[in-house]
Image (cartoon, rainbow, N blue to C red):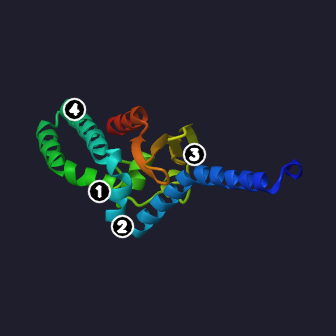
Amino acid sequence: MLNKFSWPYRLLVVLLALGVYGFMRQPVVLLDELKTTLDNKDEAQWQSLTGTAQVQPYSKAMLESLLKMKYAADWEQGNRGDAINSYYAGQEQLDVISRQLAGTEGFRHFICGDLTGFLHTSEQSAEGCWQLDGVVRWVSPVEVRVLFVNPQTGWQSSLLLQRDGLFSWKVAAADLPVDEILAAYQQRLVE
């Protein structure tokens, strides 16, 4: 088909195809940069890539919910002294743990929904959310949602990436399977 057009139009079509390819590849490049930053534990670079995503307040709110659930379960079992002590001890640790979950140390646990196990276990798998292997879905020309699946639980979480200028992208938000996480934690408390 290109043989029917003169060489300037052929060149223009090739340049346009390369431009579209480069445009479509940018979110994948950001995801690769996130992986590299996590592997290198470069906290300053991590904050520049994810600073607008508000991961730390999100993880803090989730941890606070889990702490309140534990408090209620301990209280109902008649362990009122232990419930109060563990609740206030947990409250003192919320900021530190939520910062770790939002940083390079615990983000893989955060995106996989393993908020309570991250202090005691390492990454669970060499696939899925643990390696930030996700499916890229275009929401609009300026937004991309990357879907991750936890291979152990089947939970689906996501990162929302937004265009930041002409040639760069940033992590704008994270979304966790909140209902599933709370239900699983409640089940562990009952057992």
Front: mark 3 or 1? 3
Quadrant in the rendering for residue 62: top left
Residue closest to the eye, 120 or 174: 174
Rendered location of residue 176, percent (x, y): 42, 39
In the image, which disc is placed on residue 43?
Answer: none
The answer to which of marks 4 and 2 sits earlier in the sequence is: 2
Q: Residue at label 4?
A: 72
189, above or below 48, in the image: above
The answer to which of marks 1 and 2 sits earlier in the sequence is: 2
Q: Amino acid at mark 2?
A: Asp
Rendered location of residue 150, percent (x, y): 51, 47
Front: mark 4 or 2? 2
The residues tagged by marks 4 and 1 sit, at their Cα atoms, a distance apart of 25 Å
Q: Residue furthest bottom?
A: 40
In the image, which disc is placed on residue 136?
Answer: 3
The residue carrying pointer 4 sits among few (fewer than 14), some (14 to 19) or many (20 or more) residues within 10 Å by Cα, namely some
Query: Which quadrant, please, contains the C terminus?
Result: top left
Quadrant in the rendering for residue 61: top left
In the image, which disc is placed on residue 42?
Answer: 2
Residue that appears at 78% across and 54% down: 10
Residue that appears at 42% across and 64% down: 37
Front: mark 3 or 4? 3
Q: Residue at label 1?
A: 100
Q: Amino acid at mark 4?
A: Ala
Residue closest to the eye, 47 or 101: 47
Residue contact at pointers 4 and 1, CB within 8 angstroms: no
Residue that appears at 36% across and 35% down: 182
